[in-house]
Amino acid sequence: MSWMNPLITQRADPHLSLVDGRYWFTASVPSYDAIELRCADEIAGLAAAEPVVIWRKHESGPMSKHVWAPELHRIDGRWFIYFAASEVDDIWKLRIHVLECQGDDPLLDAWVERGQVRTHAEGFSLDATTFEHAGRRYLCWAQKDPATESNLYIAELANPWTLATAPVLITRPDLDWERIGFLVNEGPAVLKRHGRVFIAYSASATDANYCMGLLWADEGADLLDAASWQKSPQPVFKTDESVSQFGPGHNSFTTTRDGKTDLLVYHARSYRDIVGDPLNDPNRHARVQAFGWTAGGFPEFGTPVADGPYSIKA
């Protein structure tokens, strides 16, 4: 199978999943004002797939500004979208919100707002993702607490929009490479393989310093015990100037259709220098590449691939 990188231009925070034999894609749109979905039978087909806007921001109040990082999840036979949004009168009042589809077709059926996910503190929060493990469903997200740094938290869910347990802090930006420009751990993405639960995340400012870190816990451990989680002392995926790939991060994971090859989905820019606020630069493009595993059972992401045709041997 093959596709072009970047797969989809000007789509940051890409979330790509394989559900019921089809690939589903969503991401932050450059205008930060809507949520769109696209679907295709093959990854390459997503580039030409017609994007469908399934929700638009409010004119005022909650969910009226900075619609960021949507993720589409299938939970107990229902479709849900997690996303962050702020308010036009308070643009950094970012909170996590949930939509639920009222039918089986996310592109055609109506979506309803299930409200804000209430966490341990009423503060800047975003980048929620959800996963199931050992019969329990969890939420992992980024939140500023204290207000100077963005940390990652985990909790069990009572339902897709309600926490069942107190949030647990599992990582804060305490390493030098997580503190360039801003003190940031964000964008968690979960991968379960080889007896471990992995959480990849992104760190530092959203320029060329943006990079990915990795947490892991044994599959039999208590995921709500902070001591269960270990952290890589070095970034696991970062800028590679030799192939003009800068600031790779905010990833998700999927596989080839046969499930035999793991795929890393991420955004990156093709240049280092940015004029003005990086958040206003629209050229974070969605990219997809395969990755392997070490003999010890850890993901080996390698480095970003250059723009152009990309293929995987069957």
Image (tube, grey):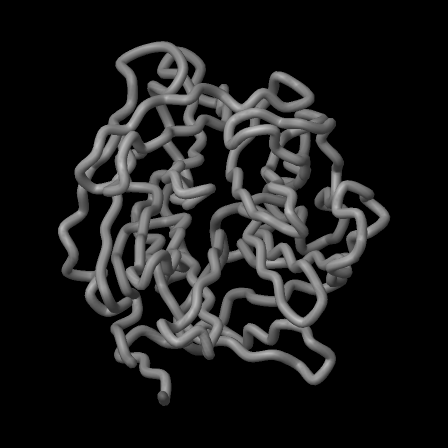
The structure residue drawn at horizontal position 37% and vertical position 29%, both measured from the top left corner, is 99
Give the left or right position of residue 292, taking residue 220 as reference.
left
Residue appearing at x 40%, y 55% in the figure: 273
Q: Position of residue 224 (x, y in %)?
A: 76, 41
Query: In this orientation, does residue 33 appear?
Result: no
Q: Is the residue 137 above or below the residue 263 in the image?
A: above
Q: Nearer the viewer, residue 78 or 106?
A: 78
Q: Residue furthest right?
A: 227
Above or below 210: residue 196:
below
**Who is closer to the viewer here, 142 or 194?**
194
Q: Can residue 273 be seen here?
A: yes
| Percent coordinates x, y for residue 77 in the rendering | 40, 43
State whether residue 232 is above or below residue 109. Answer: below
At 48% from the left edge and 56% from the top edge, which residue is drawn?
251
Residue closer to the observer: 197 or 105: 105
**Residue drawn at x 70%, y 84% as measured from the top left:** 295
- Examine the image and state in which quarter residue 213 appears: bottom right
